[in-house]
Image (spheres, grey):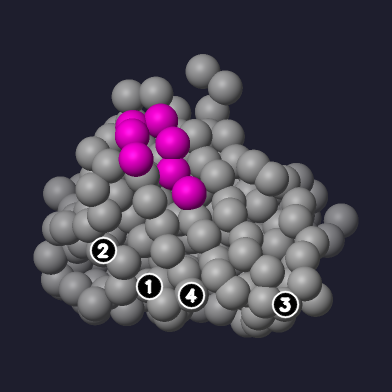
Amino acid sequence: DAGVIQSPRHEVTEMGQEVTLRCKPISGHDYLFWYRQTMMRGLELLIYFNNNVPIDDSGMPEDRFSAKMPNASFSTLKIQPSEPRDSAVYFCASTQTVTGELFFGEGSRLTVL
Amino acid sequence: GENVEQHPSTLSVQEGDSAVIKCTYSDSASNYFPWYKQELGKRPQLIIDIRSNVGEKKDQRIAVTLNKTAKHFSLHITETQPEDSAVYFCAVTDSWGKLQFGAGTQVVVTP
């Protein structure tokens, strides 16, 4: 398996633009997590899904953020409109069981100017 | 929700010495405690984990201990080497499957 695949790896955009980050989890993994990493706040859990259903989105910063998982092999995290404070590395991760290893993608580095 | 505190935030050790990182958590129902290592510019990767029915687990130079009563667990790295330099994160999974990370510890191993 190629592991968790995220795209784009890097995104530079201007304030107010829409940003869509994409993730393909490892096949057979029932759980998918979205994390945001910054120097100030570390690794923050934004939202996670179980069998494509959002279980907990309490970490989503505000209404500008939304996440979907239309099927078992694809998830998106959308920011609209983007702001400079959204600049961070966004990680997608998947696992077969919540008490097992979490496999991270390589991350999407977002810069909002 | 779960609150995970990790100390210290930075740790500098001489090569060959030991490093210890400690985490405390708040939810007594938490049952899974992994540790992740993140090298500069890379993704976090699991290095060791422990479940609530075990008090200690060891894998070569790394070990994790868990004290459920006190709600804390620690990572021990012995005979540190330069390649151990990285950021280490503890994490806690609650009974709902939510995995929360500590703030991270920057470990620097100096030759």
- Nearer the observer: mark 3 or 1; the answer is 3
Dot 1: few (<14), some (14–19), or many (≥20) neighbours within 10 Å?
some
Q: Look at label 3 and name its amino acid.
A: Met
Which of the chains bears the disc numbered 3? A
Q: In the rendered view, tell whether residue A28 sits above or below residue A64.
A: above
Dot 4: few (<14), some (14–19), or many (≥20) neighbours within 10 Å?
few
Dot 2: few (<14), some (14–19), or many (≥20) neighbours within 10 Å?
some
Left or right of B71 on screen, residue A40: right
Q: Which residues are magenta?
A: A70-76
Q: Same subunit under labels 3 and 1?
A: yes
Q: Which residue is mark 2?
A: A56
Residue drawn at point x = 40 percent, y = 72 percent: A60
- Rendered location of residue A21, percent (x, y): 58, 51
Query: Whole-Å distance between the Cαs marked 4 and 2?
Result: 17 Å
Total numbered labels: 4
Q: Which residue is mark 1?
A: A59
Left or right of A9 on screen, residue B90: left
Q: Secondary structure at mark 2?
A: strand
Per the picture, the main secondary structure of the magenta-coloured stretch is: strand
Q: Secondary structure at mark 4?
A: loop
The label shown at residue A15 is: 3
Quadrant of res B28? bottom left
Q: Look at label 4 and name its amino acid.
A: Arg
Q: Which residue is mark 4?
A: A64
Query: Reading the chain from its start, which is encountered first: label 4 or label 3?
Result: 3
Query: Reading the chain from its start, which is encountered first: label 2 or label 3?
Result: 3
Residue A84 visible to the viewer: yes
